[in-house]
Amino acid sequence: MADLAIAHPERQAAAESPAQLRQDRLLSVGARCALPVALLLGIGFLAPLVAILGYAFATPRSFDVFSSFTLANFATLFDPANTVWLSFFWSCGLALFTVAILAVVAYPIAYGLNMVFGRWSALISVLFVFPLFVSENVRLYGWVLFYIRNGVLDGSLKWLGLPGGPEVLYTPGITLFGMVYTYLPFMLFPMTLGLALVPRDLVDAARDLGAGRLFIWREIELPLAMPGILIGMLLTFVLAIGATAEAKILGGQSIIVISHDIEIAFTYSQNWPLGSALAVVVTFFIGALTLFALSKLDLDRMLGKR
């Protein structure tokens, strides 16, 4: 029977029910398999975005979602007297500094994981991943205990008869330090992937032809690893611009970041439409930046498709 079906596929198609044929025309096998994931993303990702978008156009200080339409919330945001943009600039500035510092710090580590550490690379990678299994707030409060007056650092220096530790808590600098510490793995591993894509035979050929180490790095390694580096920078920037815990716990709200303003609008102010409008503006900015960056990346080469 199987040979007959193979020899005469038109008979097998004719034997299928009309309902089955219509279903096959509507959804392919891959689409039917992806349907549960699509439903999960729709409920867990798209639905909240639609709700936020609806609230952004609702009457200020109300819950008339989808029953009113006004641009008053966006007018409030773009009012020159509104200080929310100071928070936005603080978030962007801290995110940019975090990306710049991590690019310098993570590159030597990524290079070592690919070229130097050898069989120890897996263990070192686990050491960088391990902190992610601990809550971010717990880790940040650990740094508070380390730097606080009479804490680990200050108490140890006084026990040794030295002056106490520096007053670093609740400053913009310690906030930046917390962001660098928190987002190091998100810069490191895409950068490691990018460096892993550099063909070693190409580097060896350049070295055999007399190219110096700096020339090889500038003309071969850096351009070929740039997709991974850019993905690490983009991922770190997107995460850092929405950071809240570092400014709250380590910075003591010495500076107010944009995510904190959104939280205040949804909690203490109970102005969900204004918070939604601010969230929409930030999401649009990050989305536009992400699409622009992805348009400059050759993802097919990174994924090994060509």
Image: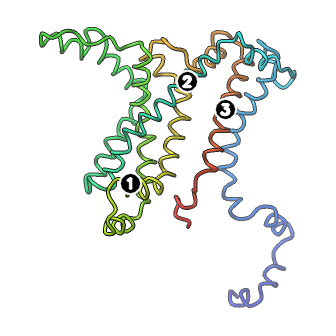
The disc label shown at residue 154, or none: none
Residue 160 location, quadrant: top left
Nearer the observer: mark 2 or 1; the answer is 1
Nearer the observer: mark 3 or 1; the answer is 1
Q: Please name the residue that numbered disc 1 is placed on.
A: 217
Query: In percent of the image, x 61 and y 18: which residue is there?
Result: 263
**Residue 105 drawn at (x, y percent):** 36, 38
Q: Amino acid at mark 2?
A: Ser
Taking 81 as reference, is 192 above or below it?
A: below
Whether residues under marks 3 and 2 lie with C-beta atoms below 8 angstroms apart, the answer is no
**Residue 144 drawn at (x, y percent):** 35, 17
Q: CA distance from mark 3 to mark 1?
A: 36 Å
Q: Please name the residue that numbered disc 3 is placed on.
A: 283
**Residue 56 drawn at (x, y percent):** 77, 23
Q: CA distance from mark 3 to mark 2?
A: 13 Å
Mark 3 surroundings within 10 Å by alpha-carbon count, few (fewer than 14), some (14 through 19), many (20 or more): some
Q: Please name the residue that numbered disc 2 is placed on.
A: 91
Query: In percent of the image, x 76 and y 29: which residue is there?
Result: 53
**Element at badge 3?**
helix
Between 148 and 42, the one nearer to me in the picture? 148
Q: CA distance from mark 2 to mark 1?
A: 32 Å
**Element at badge 2?**
helix
Between 60 and 8, the one nearer to me in the picture? 60
Quadrant where the C terminus sits is bottom right
Residue 102 location, quadrant: top left
- Between discs 2 and 1, the one toward the N terminus: 2
